[in-house]
Amino acid sequence: MVWLLGEFVNPEIVLKDKPILWYDFINAGIVSLKDICYEVKTGFLPDCAIVEIIQNVFENSNVKNVIDRYHCLICAIPDDWKQTVQSELHYRNAKRTIDISVIINHVPFELPLCTVKKLYNCLLDDICKDPCGIEMWKTLFNIDDNDFSKIWCNVNLFWKPAKFIELDYKILHNCLFTKSKFKRIGWSDDDLCDVCGSEIEDLVHMFINCDELLEFHNYLSELFVKLFENCDSDRISGAQSEHLLLFGLNWKMKGVNDSFVNFLLSTARYCIFRRRNIIMNGKTNVNLVQFFKYTLKHYVIYFYVYMCQKHKMHFLFEKKFLLDNPLVKEVDDDIIFKL
């Protein structure tokens, strides 16, 4: 079996009348003829495959040097060995298996013997860690773990635009780059908000406390009065407006289209953040209310065309955007807004 014969310190394979001994090849696992041959067809591995094998262990290895030595190794292999490699396939006699064990509560378990429940417990208790960013929100708004888990549902709504999901995710993790963070890491000389120019910009200021948001907040309040007009629950009266704007509506109420409310709030957050970036980049300020109206209309009409006209999912569009919604109506195959 030529496949198992060693390539190094082998009197049959010599270079300048001396056996070959290359430690980088050996440490990378290239020790016998089978290690430089295909497993599913005849022939030797190409140069790039050998380079990749070596660089998995030695990242800074010289590519040209590896290729040159590989060519020398091929030349040094006896002709009858090379003929075998070029004409026959190598089949492994033993089935390859990988034994993996996991440690759960300091007790090792073989992976094939683990139940799904044990693996989930391992992930939740021993591997996964709660993100540190959410602790600020839990303290600021007195949110318990159960309520916080519902917020993730609003973040990851499958029909939201990807840039809305990304922004909501960063807000929830408190990982947006604000001016205060820029100054802390030396990317900015000051930490003042570029929109109002008078206060330090942290995440709460960006979306809640900035004086330039007063008109927009008042406008949103007027929309909420309409959206919750037919609400049969008094729970909304105890909700914090800041919590709603940042995280959305985390419970269902009869007479309220929570899907549309959360989409509207996600659009509002995006417009606030986008307007702020426009100003930061030295562009002219935009009217936030008008920008919000345009963006909301754009996406609702897009979903209407996509769901109703392209994919015959009118029932889904009606559920997400029209039901119990005084702001958006469908009239004669057209969308009418009352914003």
Image (cartoon, rainbow, N blue to C red):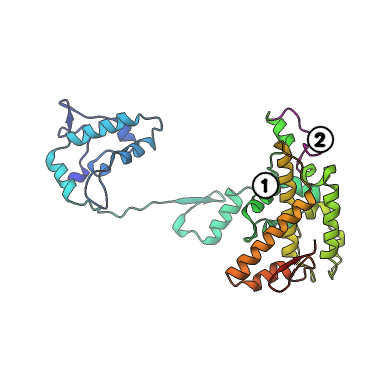
Looking at this view, is 244 or 117 the one in front?
244
In primary-sequence order, the first of circles 1 and 2 is 1
Label 1, on which residue?
170
Q: Amino acid at mark 2?
A: Gly
Q: Secondary structure at mark 2?
A: loop
Q: Is residue 327 magenta?
A: no
Residue at (67, 59) in percent of width and height: 299
Q: Amino acid at mark 1?
A: Lys
Residue 65 visible at all? yes
Measured from the top left, where is residue 29 in percent x and y?
Answer: 32, 39
Residue 240 visible at all? no
Snapshot quadrant of residue 303? bottom right
Label 2, on which residue?
197
Give neighbour class at mark 1: few <14, some 14-19, many 20+ (Cα, 10 Å).
some
Question: What segment carries the magenta color?
Answer: 188-203
Measured from the top left, where is residue 89 in percent x and y?
Answer: 21, 52
